[in-house]
Image: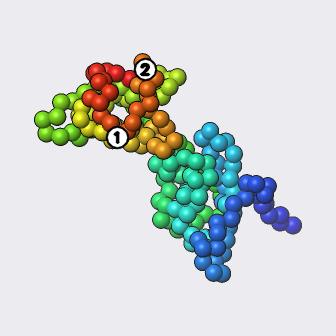
Amino acid sequence: METSRRITATQSTLISLSESEVKDNEERFLLKLQSGLKHPDQYYYWMGRNTPFKELIIDYTRRIDVPLSSVRFLFDDSPINPLFSANRLELEDGDSIDVIRRDVSASTETTLISLPRAKGEMPITLKVGLFGTDHHLLYLIGRSTPLEYLFLDYADRTSLFYEKIRFYIQKRWLLIDPKKTSDDYKMEDGVS
């Protein structure tokens, strides 16, 4: 007598992609996502076999509130192309996909991230870091360039949502207006 093994999930972890992403009469299958992120939960997706993985990737990153660029999806230790489907990868019911966090780009005292500046514009070196950590990035930016460009780059490199973070001048605990420049705040080279 042959028995079949079926992975089960609780109602709170089973996610069915909406009908708009799954074509009529398309065969569905169960896919497990294993995460090494802050969210060690396992998510199970009930989805169409021809549904592109981009639908799952978008849903998952929104669900755990992280930017798309901050995670990678792997099957058998190989990155998954978001345009591929389960049929293309020959996935079977109950197979697993690994979700890993991308490494944060770092900088040292000898490495500067140089942002574009106007011709002849005087540059300034600024140190940007997360409060309470030793991690920081060094930027070379024009003195009259709006600081928003630096903030957007920093958020992208650290996989943080730009809209959810605030930037302060450390020594003064002054909230920085992204539309202003380093000259507006009378910043000096190396200021955090």
Confirm whether residue 136 shows in the render. Answer: no
The residue at the point 18 percent across, 40 percent down is: 118
The spot of residue 185 in percent (x, y) is: 32, 27
Q: Which residue is mark 2?
A: 172
> Could you classify mark 1 by the number of other residues whose Cα lies within 10 Å: few (under 14), some (14-19), or many (20 or more)?
few
Marker disc for residue 188: none
Q: Is residue 74 left or right of residue 41?
A: left
* Count of numbered marks: 2
What residue type is disc 2 on? Arg
What residue type is disc 1 on? Lys
Quadrant for the N terminus, please: bottom right
> Could you classify mark 2 by the number of other residues whose Cα lies within 10 Å: few (under 14), some (14-19), or many (20 or more)?
few
The spot of residue 127 in percent (x, y) is: 36, 25
The residue at the point 24 percent across, 35 percent down is: 144
The residue at the point 37 percent across, 39 percent down is: 178
| Image-quadrant location for residue 136 | top left
> Which residue is at the far left?
120
Judging depth in this view, the residue of 4 and 181 nearest the camera is 181
> Which residue is at the far top?
171
The residue at the point 69 percent across, 57 percent down is: 44
Q: Which residue is mark 1?
A: 179
